[in-house]
Amino acid sequence: MDHLEEIRARIGIEELVGSYVQLKKAGRNLKGLCPFHNEKSPSFIVSPDKGIAYCFGCHQGGDIFKFTQLVENVNFPEALKILAQKTGVKLPEHAPLVANQRLKTIEINQWATQFYQEKLEANPPMKNYFLDRGLTDETIRKFKLGYAPDSFDQLKNFLAGKNFDKKDLIEAAVVSQRSIADQNTYDRFRNRLMFPIFDHQDNPVGFSGRIVGQGEPKYINSPETPAYSKSLILYGLNWAKESVKAKDMAIFMEGYMDVIAAHQAGTTNAMATCGTALTPQQLKLIQRYTKNVCFCFDGDSAGKDATFRAIELAQLSEVNIQVIMVPEGKDPDECIKKNPAAWQKAVENPISVMDFYFDFALSHFDSKSIQGKRQIMDFLMPVIKTAKSEVEQNIHLNRLALELKTDTKLLWNDLRAMKGKKIAVQETSATGPKGREQFSQEEYLLGFVFSHPEIYPEVAKGLIENIPLDPNTERFYKACKTVYTRESFIDLAHIKEELSEEDRGRVEVLGLLVDEEYPDFSEETRNREIRKLIRAINLRNLTGIHKEYQYKIRLSQDPEQTKVLLNRLKETSELMQGI
Ligand SMILES: [Zn+2]
């Protein structure tokens, strides 16, 4: 990987980005208009120190290689070639021709897909897993579902028989290598149900393997390869594109099984992001087929969160957005199986974004109490503020006034008095849904840890253990804990070793976030901010647990269980008072 380092040494991120975007100095960093979404005030930050460029509006960016991939819309090897040319670095001669490597990867994936399909047919218990979940034979064939046998070398040997080089199999990521020192390779997917992932032109570009039965990790996915860029792929688009055009509408879901079940039930314009949040590139891709998108994520709180994030991102582009509320059951797959008629009705009657926000606010907060009214207003007013015209704002304010039993005029006063900008860290948002903020408090706190690792012990001591943190950040906190327990201090390089490729980029981004939001903080102000965050996170998490216990107590039929729950409720209350 010497040539990568050489390229890095020859071109700084600011120089590279500067050739695409006009940049202005802003403290230690530089700022410009984001090349990935339309904006009027700059939220695209370039950090020469960290070697990354990142947009806090649409959440896109990365180092020089990632940036080139995104801005030129190419895969990694092609970006490498572009940068080698720019910097005059000679790539090693054995570096494969880019187009060929992509095609080779696709060809390998084609064989692997066929191999997994045959193994599924030969293993009825595995096939039953799909049949039991309501999929027909025809659906299993259409989506080319398969099974990776419980073996380290069956696929490897099968592909060796097709005369592929070991090197190409590693590039395609169907086999893995233990380390540089240990040259032996083995099958990446073992004893897993296989979902091949296709690009919109019907090429198999990667795989997702689901564990058989229970266990972790539930899914293993192909990493980025010469054929597979996750942020560019929409799972299911190859089967959906004609239907998307005909219905002039694209439905975005969360999981592979959701998409497959939806197609089987006749909702043939459904697709999913591949285990990542929605990206601007995916939104660009879908606009080739339609301007109308509908989000249909799981009904649980993570799904709601994903919906808020997707809406915020989509509002930056020119698509029309609606939301499908999944009736009954947690996810679309479940609902389709249990009640196809209800599913059909939901698909035919998507709701507006504003309805979705109203629905969320009114079902989460108590519109009868003063505190609840305040929470509903805190949540809805900023959204209403973004409505395009005063006429529209008036419609929403009338509705809100009706729900809160107050006067529209008073709400207008409040709306006019509101400032445009969101406050990054709000203590009052303790019980608020975090999807409304671009970054969660847990993420801000991590940002502080990553930009000032010496504060970690205080953070570790401050956070109450064994209560659920923002699920998107759990992995990072775990990595910090592992490294700190082992080495008694936090070394970012070691933290990154504990994380996946994608999460590693996140470490830099969160560090940059804190640099940007708190540019000239004194140590004292910084520490105060950190304490504030810890307190808010603890309080929010405890409030959630407290509510959960109250809810369970209300439902409990068993006096013994109620007693246990009441004790826990009391403990939680005491903890909350201690904060
Ligand atoms: Zn952007």
Image (cartoon, rainbow, N blue to C red):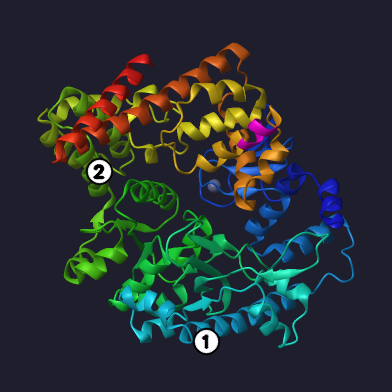
Residue 328, image x, y percentages: 20, 58
Res 523 quadrant in image: top right
Residue 243, image x, y percentages: 36, 78
Please tell me whether residue 34 is drawn above or below residue 572 in the rendered image. below
Q: Residue at x 78, y 79 (%)?
A: 165
Q: Residue at x 66, y 69 (%)?
A: 173
SS category of the residue bearing label 1 = helix
Q: Is residue 419 visible?
A: yes
Residue under numbered circle 2:
360
Q: Residue at x 58, y 34 (%)?
A: 513
Verify CB contact (< 8 Å) between mark 1 and mark 2: no
Q: Is residue 419 left or right of residue 485?
A: left
Residue under numbered circle 1:
118
Span of residues in magenta: 482-486
Label 2: few (<14), some (14–19) or many (≥20) C-alpha neighbours in 10 Å: some
Q: Earlier in the sequence, mark 1 or mark 2?
A: 1
Please tell me whether residue 529 is drawn above or below residue 40 in the rendered image. above
